[in-house]
Amino acid sequence: MGLDPKHVDVNGVRLAYVEHRTATSSAPLVFVHGYALRSSGDLYEKLFAQLSREFVVYAIDLRGHGGSNGPESGPWSLAANADDVASLVEQLGLQGAVYAGHSIGGYIGMLTEIRHPGTFSILCLLATGPASGGRSNPEGIADTFIQHGSDQAVMRDTLGPMYLRRDPRGASSAAAACSVIAPSVHEAFFPEYQSASLEDRIAEIGSAVLLVNGARDTVVPPEEQHLTARGLRRSKEVIFSDEGHMLPLEAADLCAREIMNFVRFDAHKFLAT
């Protein structure tokens, strides 16, 4: 799409974001990428092309990712990222925004609502990081990111199997996104996420929540995603039997359709109760 990122200063960091809109766009939607990826660039372009028919998409790079500056300007933590999202929404005046997040972006969305209730009335979590945190992360994944995150060849081999269609272009783009992340981000993220848990608090979330998951996810066990759905008070879970962890990239049309239908037809039923 080739859109230039904009920037907003929040909590001591400069966050990059890209706006995707068309003549039919109306309500705002805030999107956050998966861990070590980026919302700017071409990774999610198919998803944004679909969503921007209905929403003005604000695609954010988390601190230390993509075009957002790194931990030298502030600590990297899950809570700091949630606070960044809430501050960006406030600064940009995005009243009534929908939230969508992939993988750790889903976890950040839940944490944002716990720390800043009412920021979003609707959360859409795509192959989400579960409420149980990273306790079920694939073995050795932390060491691979910490030691080899800037090595694009290693990261292509690491991220490639997450694509069920074995898309070399997608894996290369994901590896390139990872390569710009400072090792200190990985060193901060993995120990915290592996011991983190929202299980005792997700029932506090008053938003209507959509979870779109793939039964062939090899990064987040589907049973962990299902437990997250069961712990939420107002949730709908959609499972695609032939999709995996990269479903927002490999099945953008399915994700966009589920998000738009949830916002149009289902969310108000949850919010009316």
Image (cartoon, grey):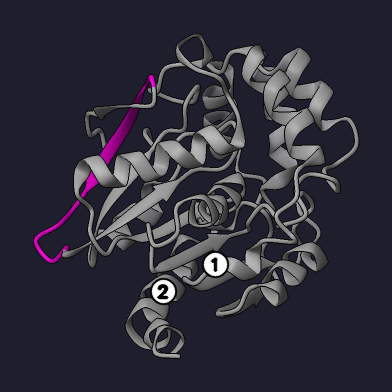
Q: Closer to the camera, 202 or 58? A: 202
> Residue 146 sits in which quadrant?
top right
**Residue 183 drawn in magenta:** no
Residue assigned mark 1: 205
Highlighted magenta segment, given as a residue range: 12-25
Relative vertical location of residue 110 with respect to residue 238 in this rendering, above or below:
above
x, y (%) of residue 20?
23, 48
Q: Which residue is mark 2?
A: 257
- Asked whether residue 3 appears in the rendered view, the answer is yes
Q: SS at mark 2?
A: helix
**Total labels drawn:** 2
Q: Residue at x 69, y 36 (%)?
A: 159
User: Would residue 15 be counted in the magenta stretch?
Assistant: yes
Mark sitting on residue 195? none
Question: Does 41 sit left or right of 165 as displayed?
Answer: left
Find numbered disc 1 in the image and state the secondary structure of the residue it sits on. Answer: loop
